Structure formats: C-alpha cells, structure tokens
Image (tube, rainbow, N blue to C red):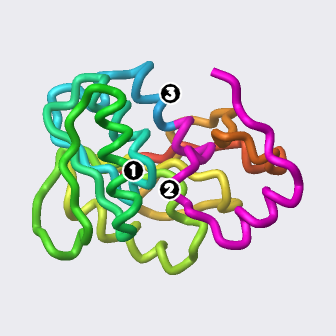
Amino acid sequence: MQQKIFDSVEIMRILQQPPYWCFCWSSGVALCQKILQNPELVADKKILDFGAGSGCVAIAASLAGAKEVTVCDLDPIALQACQANAQLNGVTLNCLADFTMTDNYYDVIVAADILYDRDNFFWLDVLPSRASHVLLADSRVKNFQHQRYQLLANMQSETIPDLFEPAEFCQVKLYQTVC
C-alpha cells in the first residue's frame, strides 16, 4: 500500500489539532510488533488496550490469540475508528468509553503513547491495580523511572502515516510491571 506524503503545511495543521486516533504512533507500532512476535504475552488472556486510539495494539492482541480484547478511549470517534479497524481486520473488540466506570480486571493492560501528557502519569499507579500485567510503550519521556515498571525492550519504530518526526521519537522503550 502506498502512503501519502504530507507536505509541511498539512503536517503543521494536523499537529495543531491532532485527531490522535488516526495515527498509529511509533510506540503503538512497536507494541504491535512485540505482541505479534511474542504471542504468549496475550494468548488466551483478557486484554484491555488503554488509550486505544485507532485500536492497532488491540487488533494485534486479538490476532495473536487473546481470548477477549477491550479498547478504552475517552474519544468516541476513536472508539468508532477501533471498531472500523477491527472489522477491516476480521476481529471483534469490546468498547469501553470510561475506564473509571467499570471495575473489570484484566490479565494484561496494554498502553502505548499515553505519557505525552504529564496528567496521564497518574494512570501508572492505577493500571497495575486492574491487571496481572501491564505493558507500556513510550517514545516521549526521557529517563522514565517508576517503581512499578521495568524496562522490557528498546525498539526502533516510526509513526504510520510517517510524520517525519525527529529520530528521538522513533526510539521506543517498552516497559512492564514489576512482579
């Protein structure tokens, strides 16, 4: 499939009012790759994709054999995008608009590119209380340190469609909760 190359004016317009869900950010791409290369991370498990955006990580989990996959995003259009992408990929996803409105427990919670907003750091303590395992992917935070998370892998990735982001945002770190 050929990708459209955005000109600089289009890129600036997108970045000024981004529909975040329309991109598969570099951390999401890396987390998809990790899951598809290591299906045992999600196989036969109940998965929540927190801050799902387009649903690419949830779809990867489903394709890798997850028992049940739920996407969670505050943006209702993102949830519609998740459903459309799930249909295109022949998988079924459950939708959750507000994580705080349920007390469901998951085997694994996956989250990619949620730390771009410092207000989201609060979730780093909440997510482990709702899952046996949390997988977190991030390309934005330098020197990330949190007592509940340890580095799992360093990966090279890029956002799709390519926004020609600085090379530093193509360096993705995957973290997992500490046992």
Q: Answer with mark 3 or mark 1, whichever residue precedes in sequence.
A: 3
- Residues at circles 1 and 2 in contact by the CB criterion of under 8 Å: yes
Secondary element at image label 2: helix
Residue drawn at x 34%, y 43% is: 84
> Would you say residue 179 is visible in this rendering?
no
Q: Residues within 10 Å of mark 1 (few under 14, many from 20)?
A: some
Judged left or right of residue 70, residue 17 is right
Amino acid type, mark 1: Ala
Per the image, the residue denoted by label 3 is 33
Residue 6 is marked as: none
Depth-wise, is mark 3 or mark 1 nearer the camera? 1
- Please indicate, yes or no, whether residue 115 appears anywhere in the rendered image: yes
What residue is disc 1 on? 81
Residue type highlighted by circle 2: Trp
Specify the amino acid type for callout 3.
Gln
Give the magenta range.
1-30
SS at circle 3: helix
Q: Mark 2, mark 3: which one is toward the viewer? A: 2
Q: Residue at x 16, y 41 (%)?
A: 46
Residue beneath disc 2: 21
- Sort mark 3 into few (<14), some (14-19) or many (20+) by Cα contacts within 10 Å: some
